Image: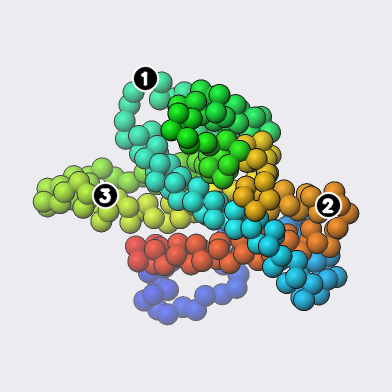
């Protein structure tokens, strides 16, 4: 009988210290908290402390200026759009890599990780060259008056590029563990392909898919290097919030830069909290938690 079943049958309360393969709870817990504090919590605390010099009224004044609002809108809305696009096409790419065998599969699988290894500035220059009006891809849209590079569309392309590996790599292991017999059983019971996808496959993938979307969104919100080369960086049109923070730092407005960063941090935290809530809800529905 499993430990979970034993707890359920005898109503044994959970304790703070659970049995673990690593000995020394105090040592390992203290190391984890110290590491998290030094790497994550302490820098964030310094950021908030610097922003607090302005006070809540000052932070609100900085955050509600038209230029800052426009930059935040560009960053968060386009990041969300890129994450949703990656959710669809990243899942399809993961499905192809897991379910099919074809020549060049290993090469394609390795290419998925290129945005992780490629310097962001190099990626931005390459994308700008491809999607400019005289580039290989941009020239195909130019006759119809569609401009991609140096517009918000260029930002979307760059954020899709850097976010796709997060979705593929989180969905791929779940697909590998998903038994094909489940799909075959659904077909034998008379379900169509669409019903099998949306009622059998997608619910099993949803927790991992939400994790990938959250990671892609978080990476896109803070992306700087690959975006500035293809965005055009026009205020109120294609200026992203990280670029505005750099601009404030170059103007020696450290408190203003910290205020914008604190607002981005708060919005990102709330968005990720909502995604994690959806993920926990989907896991409970599937009986995984």
Residue 177 sits in which quadrant?
Answer: top left
Q: Position of residue 45 (x, y in %)?
A: 78, 65
> CA separation, marks 1 and 3?
26 Å
Q: Nearer the viewer, residue 39 or 10?
A: 39
Q: Do we see residue 282 in this rendering?
A: yes
**Dot 2 alpha-carbon crowd within 10 angstroms: few under 14, some 14 to 19, many 20 or more:** some
Q: Nearer the viewer, residue 271 or 153?
A: 153
Q: Relative to residue 226, is residue 40 drawn left or right?
A: right
> CA separation, marks 2 and 3?
49 Å
Which residue is the site of mark 2?
249
Q: Earlier in the sequence, mark 1 or mark 3?
A: 1
Q: Earlier in the sequence, mark 2 or mark 3?
A: 3
Point out the image quarter for the C terminus.
bottom left
Residue in the image at 62% along x and 64% along y:
267
Which residue is the site of mark 3?
197
Point out the image quarter for the N terminus.
bottom left
Which residue is the site of mark 1?
103
Q: Position of residue 248 (x, y in %)?
A: 81, 54
Q: Do we see residue 221 in this rendering?
A: no
């Amino acid at each position: 009988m499993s430990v979970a079943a034993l707890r359920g049958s005898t109503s044994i309360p959970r304790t703070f210290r659970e049995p673990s393969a690593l000995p020394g709870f105090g040592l390992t817990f203290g190391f984890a908290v110290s590491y998290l504090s030094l790497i994550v919590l302490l820098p964030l605390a310094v950021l908030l402390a610097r922003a607090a010099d302005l006070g809540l009224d000052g932070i609100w004044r900085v955050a509600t200026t038209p230029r800052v609002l426009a930059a935040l809108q560009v960053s968060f809305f386009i990041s969300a759009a890129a994450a949703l696009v990656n959710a669809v096409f990243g899942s399809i790419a993961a499905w192809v890599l897991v379910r099919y065998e074809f020549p060049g599969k290993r090469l394609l699988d390795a290419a998925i990780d290129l945005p992780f290894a490629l310097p962001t500035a190099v990626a931005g220059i390459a994308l700008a060259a491809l999607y400019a009006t005289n580039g290989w891809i941009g020239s195909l849209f130019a006759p119809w008056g569609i401009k991609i590079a140096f517009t918000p569309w260029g930002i979307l392309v760059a954020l899709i590029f850097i976010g796709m590996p997060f979705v593929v790599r989180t969905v791929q292991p779940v697909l590998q563990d998903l038994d094909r017999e489940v799909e075959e059983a659904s077909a034998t019971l008379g379900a169509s392909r669409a019903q099998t996808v949306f009622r059998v496959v997608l619910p099993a993938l949803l927790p991992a898919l939400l994790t990938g979307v959250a990671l892609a969104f978080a990476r896109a919100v803070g992306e700087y290097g690959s975006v500035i080369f293809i965005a055009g960086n026009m205020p109120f049109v294609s200026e992203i919030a990280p670029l505005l923070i750099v601009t404030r730092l170059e103007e020696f407005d450290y408190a203003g830069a910290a205020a914008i960063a604190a607002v981005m941090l708060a919005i990102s935290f709330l968005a990720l909290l909502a995604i994690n809530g959806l993920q926990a809800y989907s896991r409970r529905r599937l009986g995984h938690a």
